[in-house]
Amino acid sequence: MPEEGIDLMAHEDVLSFEQIVSFVEEAVKTGITKVRLTGGEPLVRKGIIELVRQIAKIDGLEDLGLTTNGILLEKYAADLAQAGLNRVNISLDTLIPQKYRKITRCGDINDVFKGIDAAKKAGLTPIKINCVRMPDSSETELIALKAFCKDNNLNLRFIRQMDLESGDFSIVEGGEGGNCKICNRIRLTANGKVKPCLFNQNEFDVKELGAKNAIKKTIESKPEQGSKNKIGKFYNIGG
């Protein structure tokens, strides 16, 4: 997140729950069986539990996950599981409290630890930890994080810090993200743009085209591999 802050999206530009659910219903008809809610931070969205509940009810959906910074997870884990969420990914780049606060601008790492425990109790497993390898990440830090995840039965994935504008990306260590050869993902942004690839400037507007047509055009335009994206940022199109 930029230190100087960001321009917030106008409320009227953000998709309603009805529009999101309608999109997922159409996506499932197309053959998509896995959905992940990400952000930004999805748990700050008012009514997130109800959105999860509505998506989870869609016939044909086999897996519903959520990526979060974990800070609000203690509050919501039980309700998310009850609403139909299957599992969570939690972003955690360091175990050092002061460094965590600096990276997140204001976060308390103890809230993340409480969120992990709450997710375990709620059955939101397997829990995956997403760690971005920062330029100043020391080997000692990474070893400590590996030990923490092993001791707590968490699946750790290392993600090299990426850059949309330069097209600098790589395969996620311990995961499938960033592997263009097998990528079959599309992404719906908060304001209704469907993207075939993060590292690509193509996008199709659900509000203008309708969900079915936007999904069709997105799949048809999916590139063989990522390139560059100079019109998006990770904080507004998701990680």
Image: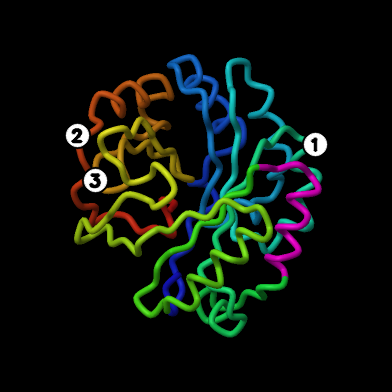
> What residue is shown at x 46% (from left), y 23% (from top)?
32
Q: Is residue 157 above or below residue 204?
A: below
Tell me the number on the disc at residue 183.
none
Going by the picture, which residue comes out furthest to the bottom? 98
Q: Which stretch appears magenta? A: 111-125
| Residue mark closest to the camera, 3 vs 1 | 1
| Residue mark closest to the camera, 3 vs 2 | 2
Q: Per the image, is 164 magenta?
A: no
What's under tag 3, amino acid-wise?
A: Gln
What's under tag 2, amino acid-wise?
A: Glu
Tell me the number on the disc at residue 201.
3
In this figure, which residue is indicated by the disc labeled 1? 82
* Among numbered discs 3 and 2, the one appearing first in the sequence: 3
What's under tag 1, amino acid-wise?
A: Gln
- Judged from the image, the secondary structure of the residue bearing numbered disc 2 is loop
> What residue is shown at x 42% (from left), y 73% (from top)?
2
* Among numbered discs 3 and 1, the one appearing first in the sequence: 1
